[in-house]
Amino acid sequence: MNELKEIRERALVDVRNIVRENTDRIREAYEVVMRLSYQARSEGLLAMEYEAGRLPKDMPFSRGIGSMVRLVVDGTNPEFVAEWMTLRFLSENYQGLEALLYFLYARGILMIQADESTYRIEEFFQAVIPQDLLPFDRWQRAGIDQKLKMAEEIKAALSEQEKMWLDGISKDLSGLTEAEWKAILQTKAFGAVDKVVPYLDEKAQALVQSHVNESRYYAIMQSTAAIKEQEICQCHEKLKLLIDEMRTKPEDKGILSGLLHRSDAEMQALIAKLDVRTIALALKGESKEVSARFFRNMPPRLKYEIQDEMRYMGPVRRCDAEEAQREILLTAEEKPGGQ
């Protein structure tokens, strides 16, 4: 591959000495890329923004990783992404460790964009990093076990008041329905609760694990650190407020949900006026209920054509999907004969 040729040539100079002296930084790069990969394969490229947003602001290259991820999430052409990465690299004139780290992040994110498996990405790291200096096999699992042990030690030192707040959080999570879990995990505010998950009881942790993907749960359990009493109290209050707001907020069924009351004949007449790409783009951002209603009123050949188009276009921007949805609504509101 010639995409990152200039970066690769500079990044692999004296790689053995660099790795030997900076194993923690290399492991950190491996962990970040693998978490992004798990997130993308579990929930799609759009979900990577959440993972990138969790990176510590003071972590080296955190802003650069965020920029790379945003380009990929926006559906930018891979060749342009690689060119942007190269220009950014040359303008910063990275050398030594920085050059190697930048290469690992850039190549890893390009592999994620190309839908390479996590196994292939691991193989990439093992090919670049001398295995006699830093093997990656089972490192991730070992990292979780170490953090869980640390969480148990911190949990044992908590006060009775802190334990009461944690019990309250566990009960609130246990009382959520499946629909509420789905809704609450889509809110950024739920991220405030992540920091207390390592200190909850096993039942509550199992609930969180069963409702989030592997990458996010791993990231949550990796965030173990000493936690202050005020933080536990705030998490308890935020979760209660979030649940109350969610249960009183009217359900948002999407822009095209108003078409659900129309008859099959009306839906078929509407579909006949629309082109394949408009329907595909609109359904990428719609609920399963709306999508199923459209597909049910299409000939099999058109249905398969639209499904293929949806797979081919990959992740789309929300604004583009909403524009297509509004176009369909305008078409649906047109009166016969253009009156």
Image (cartoon, rainbow, N blue to C red):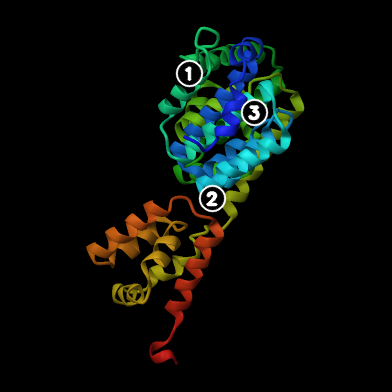
Quadrant location of residue 338? bottom left
Circle 2 — which element? loop
Task: Point out residue 202 in the picture as x, y percentages from the top left corner.
Answer: 51, 21
Task: Point out residue 159 in the picture as x, y percentages from the top left corner.
Answer: 71, 17
Residue tagged by mark 1? 126
Say whether residue 53 is visible: no
Farthest residue in the left direction?
Answer: 300
Q: Residues within 10 Å of mark 2 (few under 14, many from 20)?
A: few
Quadrant location of residue 308? bottom left
Q: Residues within 10 Å of mark 3 (few under 14, many from 20)?
A: some
Q: Compared to 67, does 291 lie above or below?
A: below
| Disc with the residue nearer the chain's start (2 vs 3) | 2
The residue sitting at 68% across, 31% down in the picture is 61
Q: Compared to 70, does 165 lie above or below?
A: above
Residue tagged by mark 3? 195
Residue tagged by mark 2? 76
Circle 3 — which element? loop
How many angstroms separate mark 2 from mark 3 (CA)? 33 Å
Three-letter code for the amino acid on which mark 3 is drawn: Lys
Residue toward you, 80 or 141: 80
